[in-house]
Amino acid sequence: MNREIPDIELIYKYYNGELDAKAMQQLEQKALDDPFLADAMDGFDEFSITKITVSQLKRNLEANITKRQKKLKATWGFRNWTVAASVVLLIGLASIYINQTEENKPIQVSELQRKAGIPKNVMPKDSLVERQENEKLSIMEESPAIVGLPENTHRGNAAVKKNDIIIEPHLSMTTYADSSKELNEVIVVDYSSRKQEALAKNEKIPAKELDNRQIQGQSNVLKAASLILIKGKVLDENGKAIPGANVLDKNTGAVVHTNIKGEFELKASEKAALAISFLGYQTKEIKTYPKDSLIVSMQPAELIKQ
Amino acid sequence: MSTSNKNNAVAEQETMWIADYKASGNLALLGEIYQPYMPLVYGVGLKYLKDEAKSKDAVMQIFEILIDKLKTHEVIHFKSWLYVLSKNHCLMQLRKEHKNIVVDLNEAIMEFEPFLHHDNAYEREKQLITMEKCIKKLNEEQKVSISLFYLEQKCYAEVADNTGYDINKVKSYIQNGKRNLKICIEKSSE
């Protein structure tokens, strides 16, 4: 049997007498070779085949297919609904979660700060931390470390007046990066003496409260103080001062020049990046840390080969 | 040759679609495969069931059989398979209805192959000679009808006009004559 699908149009025409004799013979011959077609044509001989019938068959087929597909979807759909429901539920939960975290963010941050603050409040007991804090403080200009406390203008004087809560000025404003040991001693002495005094005088100022006030002040300083004064000296390869060298703060873009002794002063953030340059020398880039002694020795630039 | 190529292309696409349907169970695809054969299935239904409504039902029932059977059966030649399936379905239905209809197991049910399928000119010539001999062996009605139909390519109606035979007789003569020819040619080539 050949595999050709007979042309139904040809069959209509055959039965409507629209075909010429040759086309009819061809279809008849096909039928002789194709028992399927032959049987069908036997049927059509007896009854008829019309376009209406065939289109009706097509409609039936389409209706049957859609009916079955719907059935398939109905059984299938139940599972889909559960899946869809769980997806919706998940999305809902996720959106609730996301909304919540957004609302909670500031709270969490402040909580973090509070948590971070707690150790600070405790730290004064730890002399090391205190020292570190004070060191930082000491090199800050216009340190408001004594916020809320009457300022004692007596320089380097550990004497404390009665009934006054006095904090020893940590350092004079001009002793920025001076020995911190001395400073620490001052603080510690001052602190203990104050404490002692408080005890002696029955001022009933809990040491802790005092500490808190002090620390609060300090942390305020830390937050506020972004600039420190950096002092340094620029020397050449032989240890001689280089006057007039450029010192650039890469963060702020501020430029200063060294004086005749090769010294410079620069207000910069605690961890500044400086670039020191001078004609004929290699530009030197350094990062400063508080308390760094900035003695920069410059290397002469390599001669340009000709 | 071009028609046989086209037939092959159609058959290949059909085979591909059937494989796709087996994999996907896509009913729309099955509809595409089945649709071109629907008039034929309907015709087969008409032939055996002798009822238009029943034939239409049979077309749908056979489609429903296809839905399952095509998934499980290895179908190589869809058209032949569908023909046998359709015919069996109709015969089964007749049996269910307890109607003792005498099914005319005529030549149309038997498979026919075009007997001139060799391209080789020599073979063809030899076969033509054999065929001529065989045609002479046929009875008069068959010989005349076959000659007119195949050699002069006249349609049944023309053959009937030329010979004065009844058109249904002409059809029968040609079918029987063709079968006898085939037998004769097969015998003589052995």
Image (cartoon, grey):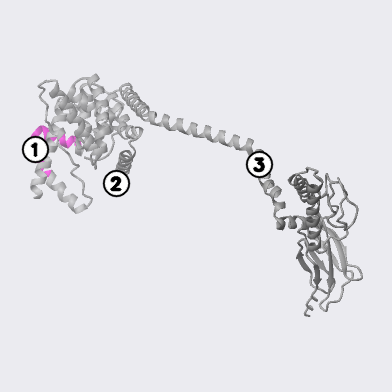
Q: Dot 1: within a 10 Å radius of its alpha carbon, few (fewer than 14), some, or many (20 or more) residues?
A: some
- Work out whether residue A233 or residue A66 is closer to the camera in this orientation and state it: A233
Q: Please tell me which residue is depicted at 72% across the width and 56% down the height of the picture.
A: A127
Residue B148 painted magenta: yes
Q: Which residue is mark 1?
A: B138
The N terminus of chain A sits in image quarter = top left
Q: Type of residue at label 3?
A: Glu
- Work out whether residue B155 or residue A29 is closer to the camera in this orientation and state it: A29
Quarter of the image for residue B85 reads top left
Residue A19 painted magenta: no
Total label count?
A: 3
State whether residue A216 is above or below residue A279. above
Query: CA gap, disc 1 to disc 2?
Result: 31 Å
Q: Earlier in the sequence, mark 1 or mark 2?
A: 2
State whether residue A300 is above or below residue B185. below
In the rendered image, residue A229, in percent from the top left (x then y), is placed at 84, 59
Q: Which residue is mark 2?
A: B1
Q: Please tell me which residue is depicted at 26% across the width and 33% down the height of the picture.
A: B66
Chain for mark 1?
B
Residue range (magenta):
B132-149
Q: Which residue is mark 3?
A: A111
Q: Type of residue at label 2?
A: Met
- Work out whether residue A73 or residue A138 is closer to the camera in this orientation and state it: A138
Q: Please tell me which residue is depicted at 53% across the width and 32% down the height of the picture.
A: A92
Q: Dot 2: within a 10 Å radius of its alpha carbon, few (fewer than 14), some, or many (20 or more) residues?
A: few
In the rendered image, residue A59, in percent from the top left (x then y), is placed at 34, 24
Q: Are marks 1 and 3 on the same chain?
A: no
Disc 1 versus disc 3: nearer the observer = 3
Q: Secondary structure at mark 2?
A: loop
The C terminus of chain A sits in image quarter = bottom right
CB contact under 8 Å: marks 1 and 3:
no
